[in-house]
Amino acid sequence: MTMSRISASLLAMVGLVAAAMAWRLGIWTSGQPGPGLFPFATGILLSATAIFSAIQTRNPEDGDGPVDFRRLGQYAVAIIGFGIAMKPLGTLIATFGLIGGVLRFIEDRSRGHAFAVAVVLAGLSWGIFRYLLGVPLPPGFMEIQ
Amino acid sequence: MDSISNLMAGLGVVLQPANLAVAFLGSVLGTAIGVLPGLGPTATISLLLPISIMLDPTAAVILLAGIYYGSLYGGSTASILLRVPGEAASVVSCFDGYPMAQSGRAGVALGITAFASFIAGIVATFAIALVGPSFASAALVFGPVEKTALVVFGLTLAANIGEGPRIRAWVMVALGLLLSTMGVDLVTGEERYTFSIPYLRDGLHVAVLAMGMFGVSEVLILAERKRDFTSALSARYRLRDLLPDASDWRASGKPMARGTVLGFVLGLLPGGGALIASFASYVMEKRISREPERFGKGAIEGLAGPESANNAAAQASFIPLLCLGIPANAVIGVIMGGLLMQGIVPGPRLIFDHPELFWGVIASMLIGNAMLIILNVPLIRVFVLLLRIPPAMMAPAILIFCVIGAFSINNSMFDVGIVIICGFLAYALRKSGFDLAPLLLAFLLGSLLEQNLRQGLILGFGSPMLFVTSPISLAFLVIAGMTLVLPLLQKLRWRRSGGVAS
């Protein structure tokens, strides 16, 4: 089964579940369209189009060449790790860690280069969001305000 | 004359120092983003939505609009020099721009691109000023029934013109509509698909969704393999090299005029936009050329026409947004999200309720295009240097802006989770061949469609007949139906004729 068929099949299931949940909300209540009418219709539309898509389509060609799954996986871990670490470590440290880690361990940049870019980008993003936009970014365990 | 005087009043708005500064910032940022392959205008505007909240609504839209048409100016640079389009609408610039660069005419190719975009941009701005108010006045008579039909028509066009097979575009339309129903139903107060999570009671935030779909997924696309674009960059460009000579102007004049008109008309259609316009212009120029064999080998007409068309279309696509409240494409959809975040609902009332915004944005296109020609011709060398920024540094920078930007909207870690999840899901959809633009458009139009559909049904005492008895609604629905059915009939006929042939 190709990736596009798997995705289409999953979307068809999502559509069916959504339509079933919408049905329970009420399609037509007190002589008026109920809160479930539109979600029900879109759930059915999603399911029907996804089923057609699963039957009809072939996998798209990736014109850029093969995907480096190891590298992609490393990035995925970095993204999730950043999301998880942002609150306990604080935005500044988490940002520094993400950029430094990505450049040093995934992109094989030198320590000095990774450190310098991480300091600049972390400082820049902190400055823009914390001071220019006044966003109360998570300070983390070190309470960096 | 009214339009011209309003445009002049708009110039007064945009010439205020703060607005002038954001127009300049948008133009520079747009050009820079356009030059850099990978990060397109949709992703960039999504990333800047949290920042745009800081500005007043007029300045925010001027900034976002400047990024959009600035990216079209810059997008051609990478296409011409590297055959790597900076953004989707610049794909066509590769066809003849790159061969021109290979034959030592890179300077002229870059120059004619900037001039074609500038001329089309200026003409389109005046055309918008003339056509826009008529559009808005005509749309004022639309009630819930007509609005429902108009949104259906818009979604049909969006699904038909999007990239990839139509059925996949329809899957994305359906998914976008479904996602738009998340949260508390405003009529009954019922919670829909919130799974008892309080953060979901207000539904998904358009900026969070857009940043995940276009920003985080772009990081994953960049992460797929190591990329390096710098090896092909060695040439230096002097101002003299960028100026087309008399024969170049003779060859480009008519294609520019045709491209501007075609682009403007296509830009008005919901679902249209710069990409379609540039392809349509290229095909048209090739068909009417006496030497079509030159196309693809460095024909300047193949560059001038599409460049005019994409800029005219980009600007014209603001009319459906500002006058009807219908986003013509994904970039305009994100800009609509920016307006909604400011508490401004785009539609026919906008020109009357917020004239300073409407005319300020239109006038900013004049100023923005003037800034862009000044920036792009003499400073092309500076922008070309941007191509030396390694993608390795771009990916984490985009990610930081997406994640911190998502947090900044509601100061909520929940949105951080949502932006990351949306990013991974969007990446999977992109790799499965689904175009995300119809999803975003449908998400934005979903609540408008539902609200008007329900009101229309109530007006008809539960009967949907009102949707076919209103002439305007019927016309939109018939066109939508034809848009759906005609390609299927053509496909069937093609299959049958293929069967006969074989």
Image (cartoon, coloured by chain):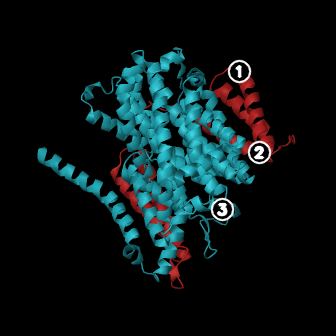
Checking the image for residue A133, the label placed there is 2
Residue name at image x 68 percent, y 63 percent: B197
Dot 2, how many residues are within 10 Å of its Cα: few (below 14), some (14-19), or many (20+)?
some
Percent x, y for residue B488?
28, 55
Dot 3, how many residues are within 10 Å of its Cα: few (below 14), some (14-19), or many (20+)?
some
**Which residue is the site of mark 1?**
A113
Checking the image for residue B98, the label placed there is none
Residue B466, relative to residue A9: is it above or below?
below
Chain depicted in cyan? B
Query: B344 or A67, which is in the foreground?
Result: B344
Mark 1 and mark 2: span between their CA atoms? 28 Å
Which colour represents chain A?
Answer: red
Q: Verify CB contact (< 8 Å) between mark 3 and mark 2.
A: no
Percent x, y for residue B77?
50, 27
Mark 3 and mark 1: span between their CA atoms? 41 Å
Q: Verify CB contact (< 8 Å) between mark 3 and mark 1.
A: no
Chain designation of label 1: A
SS assignment at label 3? helix
Percent x, y for residue B418?
64, 52
The amino acid type of the residue labelled 3 equals Leu
Query: B427 or B49, which is in the foreground?
Result: B49
Single out the residue that lies furthest toward the bottom: A30
